[in-house]
Image (cartoon, rainbow, N blue to C red):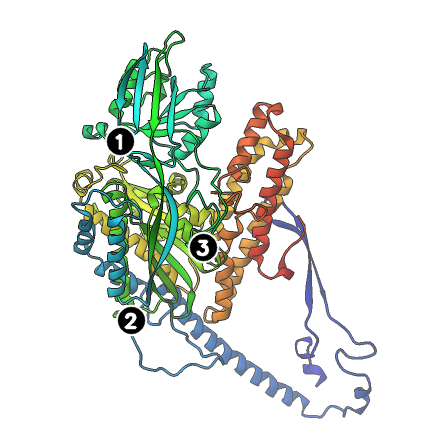
Amino acid sequence: SPDCRSSQFSGEPTSYTRFSIARQTDGDNSHVEMNLAADEEEGGEIGRPEHLHASMPPPRRNGKNLCFVIMAAALLLLIGFLIGYLSYRGRMQRVNRCLDGSGNCEMTPTASYFSDDGMEEEEVPGPRILYWPELRKMLSSKLSTAHLEANLRQREGKNSFEAGKAEDESTASRVHDQFTSFRMDDVWNDEHYVRLQDKGSSRNQVFIIEDGQEEELESPDAYVAYSKSGTVTGKPVYVNYGRKEDFQKIRNLGVSMNGAITIFRAGKITLAEKVANARKEGAVGVLMYPGPSNDRKADSYVPFAHAHLGTGDPFTPGFPSFNHTQFPPVESSGLPQIPVQTISREAAARLFGKMDGDKCLEEWRADIMGCKVTVSSSSKMTVKLTVNNVMVDRKILNIFGVLKGFEEPDRYVVLGAQRDSWGPGAAKAGVGTAILLELARVISDMVKNGDYKPRRSIIFASWSAGEYGAVGATEWLEGYSTTLHAKAFTYINLDTAVLGSTDIKISASPLLYSLLETTMKRVKDPANDSRFLDSRLGSGWIKKVVPLDLDNAAFPFLAYSGIPVVSFGFYDEGDEYAFLGTTEDTLANLKRKTVSLYLLMRTAAEVAGQIALRMTHDHELFLDLDRYSDELLSFQEKLWHFNGDVKELGLTLNWLYFARGDFQRAADALRRDIENSDRENRIVRRALNDRMMKVEYDFLSPYLSPKDAPFRHIFFGRGSHTLKSLLENLEQLAANKTSVDVNELKEQMALVTWTIKGAANALVGDIWNTDNEI
């Protein structure tokens, strides 16, 4: 009747809201205008043709009673809906407690509560279903220090596991057999035919030449892979760590590098980066000695290394080295083109003793007595370096095992470890391989015998030729580059997980910071069972995250393929493991360096295992987009100082700030979509997870060729397209406005701006939801 009719039940078409948003550079929106409108039909009541009014009967006397009946029915329906909603909300809260491990669970987060038609499913007896706290405890209870020790002792008594040689292939066969014995869903290997470098028939040599007389300084057994072979002579010049700022100090001292043989100490940056910097300054050869150690025996040892400024086979850059693939002669631009050799600390001390030039800067002394920058202007002393390395073609094997997911088998987390080493490689490759095998055993047992049904797949990978610059891992990534970034959502690196006892070293994508922090709060400290690992990190641990370098196998996963990565391990700050990469990297030396080696290995395995299990257990991928928003905001704050310098060139940084704001808004929108989504709807959940896992890939600049610039990541890559390079150019602009190429600066700003904007657009999802304004 007319007196109980309301607009709520009048049958109006749905109203719509129109927003007008003014863009702010800080990521916020303001000036929001909201207009509500409803379509109206001409000539009568809304939604009702006018001719119907004439035929309507007059209201009856009992209209009010009918109105009360309708209202009572509506009230009963509302009460029923509220009861159902509160019951469902209570169950979902318990599920959330299951997911974060904060409470007891009566229901399973991995089970579906409703069938596709919305009706409750009938309970059917089946296998026990595990909650996250129970799964975490199961992992911890099954990890065995005895198994870890047995795995590591497999390397005892063997002097070398060089890639592609007998011991490496024997270890590969053993890994394959163990994966098979664990009853994995599939075990396979990838063969790659790569070009490596080996030592020649005679040792490399370093001589000191004085008054026409040659004196051998050292003739080490170790060598530097991919060094140029040949003999060079030049005056010695010490350049500390070989960083750009170190070379700038040498220039300030007026020391010429042309024709010099540079001397570096190990650390801060990779040897390949040191060599590239030296070559750019005009050096003809490079010597590097290890850093200080509390173990005096280490002073006589010489480490192996490689000098390729890149990863993978440098003779098939950007392409996989499969046997059936033939390429024209090509080589990586990252090859050094000058002879390079490592020497012992003892040899470095003798060399400094022969130099009669100025003493080293205070901060360059490196605990070596008599450190000198170079020889005096009147000195005739020179250094002669002879390298006899030879190129060899070898077949290498990567070994894989997989436990397939029950819901999304085509989405997977990868755990990997380097298998090869130039020496015994206890710390370099033994620890990581032992942890890989133990995690494969334990997680396989949890799946095959312990009722765990992972949503997504877990791949275990054993890499070869890691010593030469992650060759095995990179060739795999290059071979499947078109699919891996869309399927692999995390790589967990197990290499060098134990190099000490007291401190923790972390390298990771910002997307995994929150998961890593949560994991640390649930893993016991091996030195004190009453506390957890997070107590070692402290509140500001993110500032101590170590940037990934070229020698870390996780680097190509992140910078080349755009896959989130984490690398975790124990070490002793200020007293690094001195035998890494030497022929003395033995189990005995590693045990002397560490306290409770196998307990530390077990703890590292538990961290890696929890991360892998959490990423395959939860409905949503544990990837924190806000961490990248924070990284972008931090970068923007560094740029503010250069606004004036850029403006003087007729340019502006505002477009970059706008792009940063777009990314933050897109991340906020995705987070709201996740919060409001139906966790039980697999299609919706998969779409949201895919948007999250693609964030890392979208930070690979799409405007560069993967062949010419393989490491395209603007945060972690290498090249002028990176945020770091842009910041360095702006710092140079502020110091000397004529020293910067304005066109290069414009291109850098464009590359960074549109890569961030593209990442924001991809994060939004559907094309009609993207904001094409900037």
Q: Which mark is residue 451?
A: 2
Q: How many marks overall?
A: 3
User: Judging from the image, what secondary structure is the residue with disc 1 in?
Assistant: loop
In this view, the residue in front, 440 or 671, is 440
Above/below status of 621 relative to 427 = below
Q: Specify few, some or many for label 3: CA neighbours under 10 Å numbering under 14, 14-19, or 20 or more.
A: some
- Judging by the rendered image, the residue that carries numbered circle 1 is 302
User: Judging from the image, what secondary structure is the residue with disc 2 in?
Assistant: loop
Q: Name the residue located 24 percent from the left edge and 23 percent from the top edge.
A: 346
Percent x, y of residue 539: 37, 43
Asked whether the beta carbons under mark 2 and mark 1 sit within 8 Å of each other, the answer is no
Residue 331 appearing in the image: yes
Above/below status of 316 relative to 372 = below
Instruction: Tell me: 39 left or right of 427.
Output: right
User: Judging from the image, what secondary structure is the residue with disc 3 in?
Assistant: helix
- Judging by the rendered image, the residue that carries numbered circle 3 is 479
Disc 2 versus disc 1: distance between alpha carbons? 50 Å
In this view, the residue in front, 188 or 672, is 188
In this view, the residue in front, 734 or 416, is 416
